[in-house]
Amino acid sequence: MSVTKNGPRPFTVIVEGNIGSGKTTFLNHFNQYEDVCVLAEPIEMWRNCQGHNLLGLMYQDIKKWSFTFQSYVQLTMLQHHTKQTSCPVKLMERSIYSARYCFVEKMKQDGLLPEASAAVIEKHFDWIQDYANVDVDLVVYLRTTPEVVYDRMMERNRQEEKAVSLDYLKALHQIHEDWLYHKTLFKVPAPVIVLDADLDKSLIREEYLKCEPHILVSTK
Ligand code: DGT
């Protein structure tokens, strides 16, 4: 356990990568360890916020729903970052950082989030960083190529993602690259491990095993 703003915190790992990069499969691999608290992305919460499918609304009309959606994503990510656990390791799918640095950034670039709305989300984000316990110890970047994740996304056929184009995935890929690989875009919140996540399911286990010792560092 390390001690930060609000007291003890487990060794915290965030798993990042493009849509369809295999974050869920990666997390599932670590479900076998009882010392690891695995927090999958709160997508079901985004699909049902008091009966409203915010993820669906966002893809139907991004301009109208971008602020609503990103506000809720930020809240649910904050809940995961601050969730108490007795496990020495916490493994999270995405983070408050990718919401802000990848998705909000992309909406801003495309003019889909009014400047005033972006300012409110950024103020909130800055306040969270200053006063909440959202520090992380390690980033696992599941690096892919856009064409591979596009095929995976088409195959899984999630209703809300029918509106997602290859061009959108290429742009998101570039933002992830600049943030976590080239490290030229935004502050990287912790050391980064890069895995080749283009690999097929039958080969990816080898990649997972490579980073296991870095993740299970605080477990006995
Ligand atoms: P995986 O296991 O790597 O295939 O993970 P996915 O693709 O299920 O999870 P993720 O986080 O890449 O995306 C789930 C959906 O939610 C996808 O349509 C993108 C969307 N999404 C996630 N976070 C945000 C966000 O902060 N803003 C926006 N606009 N969309 C987001």
Image (spheres, rainbow, N blue to C red):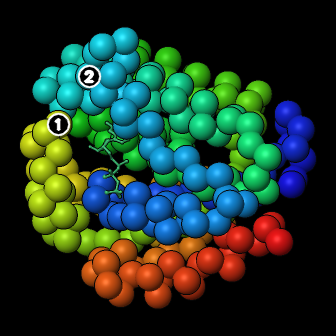
Q: Position of residue 66 (x, y in %)?
A: 30, 24
As rendered, which of 56 and 178 lies closer to the eye?
Answer: 56
As rendered, which of 110 and 190 lies closer to the eye?
Answer: 190
Q: Position of residue 46 (x, y in %)?
A: 36, 28
Disc 2 secondary structure class = loop
Q: Is residue 9 above or below residue 112?
A: below
Q: Is residue 168 above or below residue 25?
A: above
Q: Give the residue number, with chain letter if any, for mark 1.
A: 160
In the image, what residue type sits under mark 1?
Glu
Residue 33, by quadrant, is bottom right
Evaluate if marks 2 and 1 touch, with contact meaning CB atoms under 8 Å apart: yes
Residue in the image at 79% along x and 46% along y: 86
The answer to whether one can see residue 152 in this image is yes
In the image, what residue type sits under mark 2?
Asn
Residue in the image at 69% along x and 35% along y: 82
Disc 1 secondary structure class = helix
In the figure, is residue 162 to the left or right of 91?
A: left
Q: Position of residue 220 (x, y in %)?
A: 83, 72
For label 2, the crowd category at 10 Å Cα-Cα, with few meaning under 14, some 14 to 19 and many 20 or more, is some
Q: Position of residue 27 (x, y in %)?
A: 49, 60
Q: Give the residue number, with chain letter if any, for mark 2.
A: 53
How far apart in space, not on screen, are marks 2 and 1 (Cα)? Answer: 9 Å
- Report whether the residue tagged 2 is closer than 8 Å to ligand 1: no
- Report whether the residue tagged 1 is closer than 8 Å to ligand 1: yes
Q: Is residue 119 above or below residue 30?
A: above
